[in-house]
Image (cartoon, coloured by chain):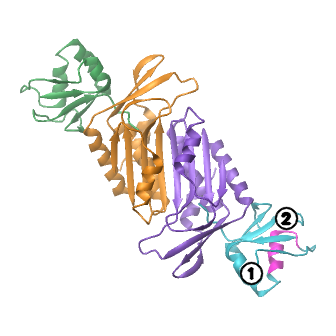
Chain colours: A orange, B purple, C green, D cyan
Amino acid sequence: MIKVQKNDFNIGHEISEITSKNQNIGGISTFIGIVRGGNNNSLNSMTLEHYSGMTEKMLNEIDNEAKERWDLIETKIIHRYGELFPGDQIVLVITASEHRKNAIESCQFLIDWLKTKAPFWKLEDSTKGKNWVEEKQSDLDAASKWKS
Amino acid sequence: MIKVQKNDFNIGHEISEITSKNQNIGGISTFIGIVRGGNNNSLNSMTLEHYSGMTEKMLNEIDNEAKERWDLIETKIIHRYGELFPGDQIVLVITASEHRKNAIESCQFLIDWLKTKAPFWKLEDSTKGKNWVEEKQSDLDAASKWKS
Amino acid sequence: MNIRYFSWVKDKIGVDNESISMSKDIKTVNDLIAHLKTISDKHNNALSDTSIIRCAVNMEVVNFDKPIDEKDEIAIFPPMTGG
Amino acid sequence: MNIRYFSWVKDKIGVDNESISMSKDIKTVNDLIAHLKTISDKHNNALSDTSIIRCAVNMEVVNFDKPIDEKDEIAIFPPMTGG
């Protein structure tokens, strides 16, 4: 299941929705992406632009691919857009399976793919001005290791 | 940080405790282990026995090893003991880091080690009677891949 | 043909979408980009380095040799940075 | 010397801990297990297959050639199944 939304999410609520409907879950993996702030970071805000329509399409495709590649009971991807601030949650991935290996691997797969395949672009507003975040080679490498 | 407790835990609360104290987190990985029930499963309950004292010692050692091997901002391991029922949460691992790779890998490391190194023993009470869960070769294999 | 722009491609061109009239010369994404670069300096500047330009046809990222026609939904943007 | 038992080792022996008097012959975990097996049929049965027996000395899992002495905290149990 996927959601693309402006609003924040609550991981406890999202997990409960899954566990209340499925009696055979043995393991749940999650990943939360957060807007980094603090320390020497001069970030004021980060605005996530996205290609509405294509985002939902891509997320559904990635979600379905995870379910094909691993034996999963349920998956959930929630990705926010709009203006976010340091400490704000950006993205949530949840994977639930009978045996932990499937949940763990598919959760990593999903977040690696989101980094390079989901049509979002991040505009950082910091004391240095506004700047679009560039693609990272490390993200491309992480995604490429899942090529089937 | 580690906790060994009879009581249930709330993942949202445990994550908030971490994020409220640390401003530079970019990624949080979690794993929840759950007592599997439902379907054709005849399980009534699962009782976790543990070696009090040694459990805390081992969990602290594993926790410290994760922090040495990966660049982590915070970790949390909560492991329950006592009688649990299908759907109940058993264990929670949380790892938080600036960059997602460290959180994801260390979370997997911790749960793999807990499976074979934490002094817990699971007594299943099912329609077939009471039975101590045996060590799984797949768990030993998972743990051994992290040998440094 | 309507074309949508995102991120700094949008900023550099100055609009988030525009319509261009199709010609027989525009058979592929490559042709389209070559044509767009002739529209203005802004377009030329935004699309000068195609190594950091991606194109989606009907919401699917495609290679630049992908054939296109008037009914397609076209979007041009930099590499994606989700997650 | 006090010895703690867990899981089915405890069930088979019938107690969760017991004290045995140390003798000069008990220098290692191996010696201790050999001694315990002479105490009763239950002990012998519980400890017959050492491939599925683990021993912790002072809360640390050790090899069976580990030297032990009276002050050590000893625990005997099956392979652990946490997580």
Q: Residue at x 64, y 61 (%)?
A: B6
Determine whether label 2 and label 1 are within 8 Å by CB.
Answer: no
Marked residue chain, label 1: D
**Which type of secondary structure does the marked residue at label 2 adopt?**
loop
Asked if A55 appears above or below B6 in the picture, the reply is above
| Residue D40 on the magenta segment | no
Q: Residue at x 18, y 22 (%)?
A: C34
Q: Secondary structure at mark 1?
A: loop
Provide the residue span drawn in magenta: D26-36
State the mark number for residue D67. Answer: 2
Q: Measured from the top left, where is residue B17 in percent x and y?
A: 59, 42
* Chain letter, disc 2 residue: D
Q: Which numbered disc, 2 or 1, marks the residue closer to the eye? A: 1
Specify the amino acid type for callout 1.
Answer: Gly
The magenta stretch spans residue D28: yes
Determine whether, in the image, residue B134 is placed left or right of residue A3: right
In this orientation, does residue C35 appear? yes
Q: In the image as oriented, which residue stretches furthest toward the top?
A: C41
From this view, report whether residue A57 is shown above or below residue D69.
above
Give residue D14's mark.
1
Q: Position of residue B75 (x, y in %)?
A: 61, 45
Measure the C-alpha gap from mark 2 to mark 1: 26 Å
Q: Position of residue B39 (x, y in %)?
A: 41, 72
The quadrant in which residue C63 appears is top left
Query: Is B38 placed above or below C36 here?
Result: below
